[in-house]
Amino acid sequence: MSRMITADLVDLDLAADTKEAAARSLAERMVARGRVTDLDGFLADVAAREAQMPTGLDGGIGIPHCRSAHVTEPTLAFGRSAAGVDFGAPDGPADLIFLIAAPAGADDAHLTILSSLARQLMNEEFTGALRSVATPEEAAALIAGEEAEEPPAEEEAEEESGEAPEGVAAGAEATGAVPFRIVAVTSCPTGIAHTYMAAESLEKAGHAAGVEVSVETQGSAGFTRLDPAVVAAADGVIFAHDVPVREKERFAGKATVDVGVKAGINRPAELIAEVREKAARGEVSAPATAASPVDKAGEPGEGYGTKLRKWLMSGVSYMVPFVAAGGLLIALGFAIGGWNIDKAPSVTEHFAWGQADSWAALMFQIGGLAFSFLVPVLAGYISYGMADRPGLVPGFVGGAIALTVNAGFLGGLVAGLLAGGTVLAIQRVRIPTVLRGIMPVVVIPLLSSIVVGFLMFLVVGKPIASLQKALTDWLSGLSGANAVILGVILGLMMCFDLGGPVNKVAYAFAVGGLANPNEGSLKVMAAVMAAGMVPPLAMALATAVRGRLFTRTERENGKAAWVLGASFISEGAIPFAAADPLRVIPATMAGGAVTGALSMAFECTLRAPHGGLFVLPLIGNPLLYLLAIVAGTVVSAGLVILLKGLRKTAPEGDGAVPAVVDPQVTVAA
């Protein structure tokens, strides 16, 4: 096995002044050694990981890292900066920077080595030695030596058995008291660094406080479950995670602290004190079972509104792939078979292999079935976002009922919230230990489905269906000034956060109308897609017209933005908005508002929920639709050029954020 770090991958005089430049400088060394095959593609993956959560840590450490298809073998590059580079740590810039690159399919052994390094970063002697080494060879040897070092056999046995560390056990023996016992789970999106650093930090803080801490790291190399006896004996639980905790129900019925993974690294002593206080007050938390897979920040002070947004976005994010697949299949069916393809007989009764109409009917009917899942999936995963897996059954049942009673998209939203709330309420009821095993698979699905079914059929279903019909009739009757105003609002929403929650609300509103399409809902879909295409197209135009106002990386991203914009992928403008939000976002919103208003005024319609210019044959008044897009693009590009031109100097560096498109939200652009 080749070494993960060599002297060629060490820069003791890193001159970069931004985190993007630092990552690029270290990544170039990886490219030179053949460890990375595509520099820009790899940096895009690094930026995507950085966008999820800053990788700066207290103590002057930055650990940009990612798993990437552009990495040939697990690799580590190290840079030492005299001036420091800001990686978002609370205590200031980082002078020790580790760029960790793991292949998309890295084996467990390599990831275990990387996790060992992550733990060493919590060792002050190790980081102090790195600050004092004089040559790249010394630095590489120091890091490689720490990687190669295996933990003593007795420590491994201690960790696997879940027994208390020696110091804790000795202290308990001396006092004759049983130590306070905590089980913890740590995890991060990449599962390479923060996961293991949080574990190390919690274990050290527990040892210092005389508390027994057993940690389950749910990293990229998989995870080994804590001994059920250790979990059962624990007095409290700490979840330090940024991705869903796997098999969370194992920790039900204990005092629980639920935070992000960086809190586990930066303030472990506070978390231990907090869980001890909760246990002392008898706060046995049902949320240990019911906490949401998307409720991952968990920081103190998070309001109900924030949680509600996360629950709704959970449902929308799972619904989006069904929208993409079903909507595009329907669009292809119309494009190949014409407007009457919806009246074709079932392909099970008639299908001619050599006729285009038969293939069009096949695609249309598959797409229609995929579309029929939209409301149940939306409701099911809103409930899942609230109550984890127990919420899926009542959520899907409630969503199906919403379709049955014609409550549509709004009914799905309500059904999901009702299902999640019902499961949470059931889980708060104390039950005998002997019955807990059947609760998730029998009792909770049965009771929650009955409650949700009753509410949707007999209480809220009909009023929501009436509201849905009124909304549909209102959309159908939109004309003149009212339609233009709606187009302005939708355009502003689509361009405000480029794939974020506001953008998704507007997109989900439009897609919901396609379930029972009419003239009004088709106009809304057209306006939404047209406005969503404006931001990347405007940035592409601006970089082409006044390239000197943009960095070299932005100019390269501008070339890709032509295709992204034409494909209705608003995220193509994210690199520009991230680098200069005060100029780019208002400009794109202005263009989006113009396009949305013109699309409505021109009475353009659209039957496909996605596809951009590639579904132009399915657009009503296509030439005017293109005119609306061009007008908004020109307005946005002009404003961006004007606002950037007010600056005294033009950027020439490479500090822009590389283009990143989230595969889960691309179709909701």
Image (spheres, helix red, strand yellow):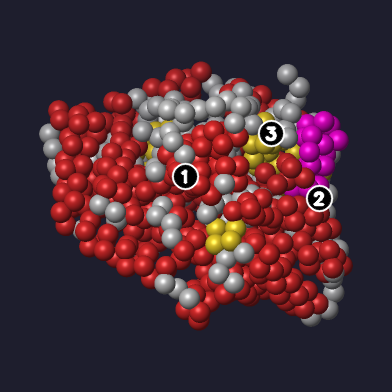
Label 3 element class: loop
Residue 69: mark in rendering: 3
Is 621 in front, or is 458? 621
Q: In which quadrant is the C terminus drawn?
A: bottom right
Q: Is residue 667 left or right of residue 65?
A: left
Q: Which mark is residue 10?
A: none
Q: Report the residue at 57% width, 65% height from top.
A: 604
Task: Please tell me which residue is depicted at 34% across the width and 58% down the height of the picture.
Answer: 410
Give 552 or 252, whichever is nearer the viewer.
Answer: 552
- Would you call the spot at circle 3 few (<14 residues within 10 Å), some (14-19), or many (20 or more)? some
**Circle 1 residues within 10 Å: few <14, some 14–19, many ≥20:** some
The residue type indicated by label 2 comes to Leu
- Give the mark nearest the N terminus, 1 or 3: 3
Relative to 445, 334 lies left or right: right
Q: Position of residue 287 (x, y in %)?
A: 29, 47
- Residue range in magenta is 22-39
The 10 Å Cα crowd at callout 2, few under 14, some 14 to 19, many 20 or more, is many
Q: Position of residue 428 (x, y in %)?
A: 19, 46
Q: Is residue 656 left or right of residue 366?
A: right
Q: Amino acid at mark 3?
A: Ala
Type of amino acid under label 1? Asp
The residue lying toward the viewer, choosing from 186 and 234, is 186
Name the residue rendered at 34%, 54% in the picture.
Answer: 408
Q: Indicate the quadrant where residue 305 lies.
A: bottom left
